[in-house]
Amino acid sequence: MRRGDFVETVLKSAQEELEPKYDLDRVAQQVAELLSMKIEEVTAFGKSPQAVIKREVSYVSGYIASLG
């Protein structure tokens, strides 16, 4: 194996490890359904209590999904 091939293989492997293992759109959709909200509300920016709760639930759901 040439040195350049080795470096390319290592970089490709590292990139694959960094790629998310879950679909954020799917997680946001599930959170929206769970909380009876529109998906736009789940992904919206803001500090309203409802928006903060949605983001926290979304974060936790994403974390749990990444474990499986």
Image (spheres, rainbow, N blue to C red):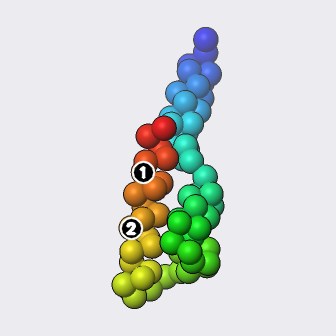
How many dots with numbers? 2
The label on residue 63 is 1
Look at the numbered disc 1 and give the secondary structure of its residue: helix
17 vs 60, nearest the viewer: 60
Residue drawn at point x = 55 percent, y = 39 percent: 15
Please identify the residue farthest to the top as the structure is shown: 1
63 vs 5, nearest the viewer: 63
Residue 17: horizontal and vertical position, in percent? 50, 37
Residue drawn at point x = 61 percent, y = 52 percent: 23
Residue drawn at point x = 61 percent, y = 64 percent: 29
Which amino acid, by three-letter code, is at mark 2? Glu
In the displayed structure, 4 sits above or below 37; it is above
In the displayed structure, 58 sits above or below 52; it is above
The label on residue 14 is none
Q: Quadrant of residue 26?
A: bottom right
The residue at which mark 2 appears reads as 56
Residue 62: horizontal and vertical position, in percent? 47, 54
Residue drawn at point x = 59 percent, y = 67 percent: 33
Residue 8: horizontal and vertical position, in percent? 60, 29
Residue 11 appears in the figure: no
Look at the numbered disc 2 and give the secondary structure of its residue: helix
53 vs 22, nearest the viewer: 53
Q: Quadrant of residue 16?
A: top right
Name the image quarter holding the N terminus.
Answer: top right
